[in-house]
Image (spheres, rainbow, N blue to C red):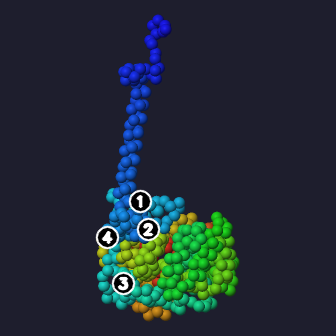
């Protein structure tokens, strides 16, 4: 019996059948509100799960209809011919397959995820809105468009014929591999490297490597720059063609072998092995090693490689390399490991490797579709072109021509624009080059304001002329090019304006301060830029081969245009 005031409580399982529904309804009414919400939420979740499962099942059934049909393979649920599976034989499907295939990136997603995801898309599409670019980049784009327009027209100047022929040959995608070889042979002839592929060495490996760098800008064995802070030639490990050469064994061996066969018309698997040994020697031993400053005479040498001979050929016509010339390098990688590597390989293999890397630098000539990505990589990786702007073939060919003949390209742009007094972009580039030297002098503690004013005044009054390096006399087309520049005779006696002015100022300073040594290295001013009367004589070698900066647009062109 229940106590007074206590309701009767009967277990639900003992309720008589006829009263079961009413008891359940009554029990639900007395449940707390939170329990009611939980119950309805559970029902909703179950319903949503069922709906999602149904949609996924539906989607999988639909996408299965677009699978590629393989008549020799049984499908799930019966024979292959029991189901009507669509084949990828129409134009749209093939185009989509090609697009997906070409969109696959070679970039390591762990190395550069943005490049891996967005590289192909960003090269074909332009984002809306305005981007922020430096003045140098804007000038570069404007000059490149001007150069492209000029090269797309005809010229009656005989000295410019090789330049226009080079551009047209690059644009002609119908050319066969034989024409590619012809173009490569002409470049090798100008570098005194005829006879590729080589069976034996020429006895002057270091001289050949230096000459190749001076004439073409290609240096796969060592990177050469100028370090103004130490007034020294700086030697660095060369740039690898792809970053994963440094940590993935046998990376890209397939296309590398195909590229070698295309360049040399014969398989040379040893070139890939040499490059892997080069990377292993230069990037792994002594990684993080500090730079040291030594004289050229103290660099390691052997019968196969002479650093001083290499540098003398690199800077021929620009700077004399003496025993006391300062060189900055990492002694383990470059001073020892590179020399050991070159000793262990036959000179012919090293020469063939140099020529092959030259071939890759002219990748736009490679018309085969399998080299499309290689062509874009070599173009976009050139210093000064980091923004990868204008990757279509015409812009790529214009850049290749500018890299091959920077002196002629600079003259071509100058001759088209020198009559236009309202060309702010060109005037800005000229002033940029002029200020670079003036700012450099301004960093020296003993240069006075009056000296700088006189120097700038002298700059404004000077005319510009050029003289031809003696080695150019070997090639008739080089001599004809020199006519456009009104070249002076190479052996004509001239006076070095900068050396004379700075030496005079230095003598006065030392006489007044009675110091045994200047506070800044003196030989930095041996520029080889000469003065005859009121005309500044610039060697064409200086225009073609600049090593303080590797970018044509910021280095070569301003020095040709140093005039008001």
* Residue, disc 2: 73
Q: Earlier in the sequence, mark 2 or mark 3?
A: 2
Residue 50 located left or right of residue 319: left
Q: Is disc 4 surrounded by few (<14), some (14 to 19) or many (20+) residues within 10 Å? A: few
- Image height of 451 relative to 540, above or below: above
| Quarter occupied by residue 458 | bottom left
* Distance Cα–Cα, label 2 vs label 3: 41 Å
Task: Write down the residue under mark 3.
Answer: 174
Residue 175 placement: quadrant: bottom left
C-alpha distance separating marks 4 and 1: 27 Å
Which disc, if any, is residue 77?
A: 1
Element on which disc 4 rests = loop
Q: CA distance from mark 2 to mark 1?
A: 12 Å
Residue 559 visible to the viewer: no
Q: Is residue 451 left or right of residue 65?
A: right
Label placed on residue 90: 4
Q: CA distance from mark 4 to mark 3?
A: 27 Å
Q: Closest to the observer: 167 or 465? A: 167
Mark 4–mark 2 CB contact (< 8 Å) = no
Q: Is residue 263 left or right of residue 137?
A: right
- Mark toward the viewer: 2 or 1: 1
């Amino acid at each position: 019996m229940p106590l007074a005031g206590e309701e009767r409580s009967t277990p639900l399982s003992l309720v008589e059948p006829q009263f079961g529904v009413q008891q359940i309804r009554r029990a639900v009414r007395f449940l707390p509100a939170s329990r009611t919400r939980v119950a309805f939420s559970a029902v909703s979740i179950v319903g949503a799960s069922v709906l999602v499962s149904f949609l996924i099942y539906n989607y999988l059934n639909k996408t299965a209809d677009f699978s590629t049909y393989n008549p020799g393979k049984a499908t799930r649920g019966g024979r292959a011919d029991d189901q009507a599976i669509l084949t990828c034989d129409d134009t749209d499907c093939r185009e989509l397959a090609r697009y997906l295939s070409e969109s696959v990136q070679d970039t390591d997603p762990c190395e550069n995820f943005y490049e891996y995801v967005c590289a192909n898309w960003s090269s074909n599409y332009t984002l809306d809105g305005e981007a922020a670019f430096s003045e140098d980049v804007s000038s570069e784009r404007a000059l490149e468009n001007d150069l492209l327009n000029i090269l797309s027209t005809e010229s009656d100047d005989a000295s410019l014929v090789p330049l226009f022929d080079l551009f047209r040959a690059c644009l002609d995608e119908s050319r066969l591999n034989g024409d590619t070889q012809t173009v490569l042979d002409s470049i090798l002839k100008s570098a005194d490297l005829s006879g590729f592929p080589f069976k034996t060495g020429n006895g002057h490996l270091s001289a050949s490597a230096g000459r190749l760098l001076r004439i073409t800008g290609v240096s796969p064995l060592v990177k050469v720059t100028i370090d103004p802070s130490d007034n020294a030639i700086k030697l660095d490990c060369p740039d690898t063609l792809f970053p994963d050469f440094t940590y993935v064994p046998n990376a890209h061996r397939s296309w590398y072998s195909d590229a070698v066969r295309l360049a040399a018309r014969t398989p040379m698997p040893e070139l890939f092995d040499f490059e892997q040994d080069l990377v292993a020697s230069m990037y792994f031993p002594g990684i993080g090693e500090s730079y040291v400053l030594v004289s050229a005479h103290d660099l390691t040498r052997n019968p196969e490689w002479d650093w001083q001979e290499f540098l003398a050929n690199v800077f021929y016509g620009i700077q004399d390399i003496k025993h006391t010339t300062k060189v900055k390098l990492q002694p383990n990688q470059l001073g020892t490991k590179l020399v050991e590597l070159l000793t262990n390989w036959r000179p012919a293999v090293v020469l063939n490797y140099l020529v092959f890397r030259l071939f890759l630098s002219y990748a736009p000539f490679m018309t085969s579709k399998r080299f499309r990505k290689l062509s874009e990589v070599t173009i976009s990786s050139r210093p000064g072109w980091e923004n990868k702007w204008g990757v279509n073939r015409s812009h790529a060919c214009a850049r290749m021509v500018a890299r091959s003949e920077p002196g002629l390209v600079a003259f071509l742009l100058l001759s088209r624009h020198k009559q236009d007094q309202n060309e702010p972009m060109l005037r800005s580039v000229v002033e940029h080059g002029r200020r670079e030297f003036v700012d450099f002098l301004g960093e020296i503690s003993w240069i006075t304001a009056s000296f700088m004013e006189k120097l700038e005044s002298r700059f404004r009054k000077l005319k510009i002329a050029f003289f031809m390096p003696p080695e150019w006399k070997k090639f008739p087309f080089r001599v004809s090019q020199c006519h456009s520049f009104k070249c002076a005779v190479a052996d004509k006696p001239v006076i070095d304006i900068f050396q004379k002015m700075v030496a005079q100022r230095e003598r006065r300073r030392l006489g007044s301060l009675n110091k045994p040594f200047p506070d800044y290295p003196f030989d930095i001013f041996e520029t080889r830029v000469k003065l005859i009367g009121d005309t500044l004589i610039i060697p064409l070698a200086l225009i073609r081969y600049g090593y303080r900066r590797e970018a044509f647009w910021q280095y070569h062109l301003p020095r040709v245009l140093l005039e008001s």
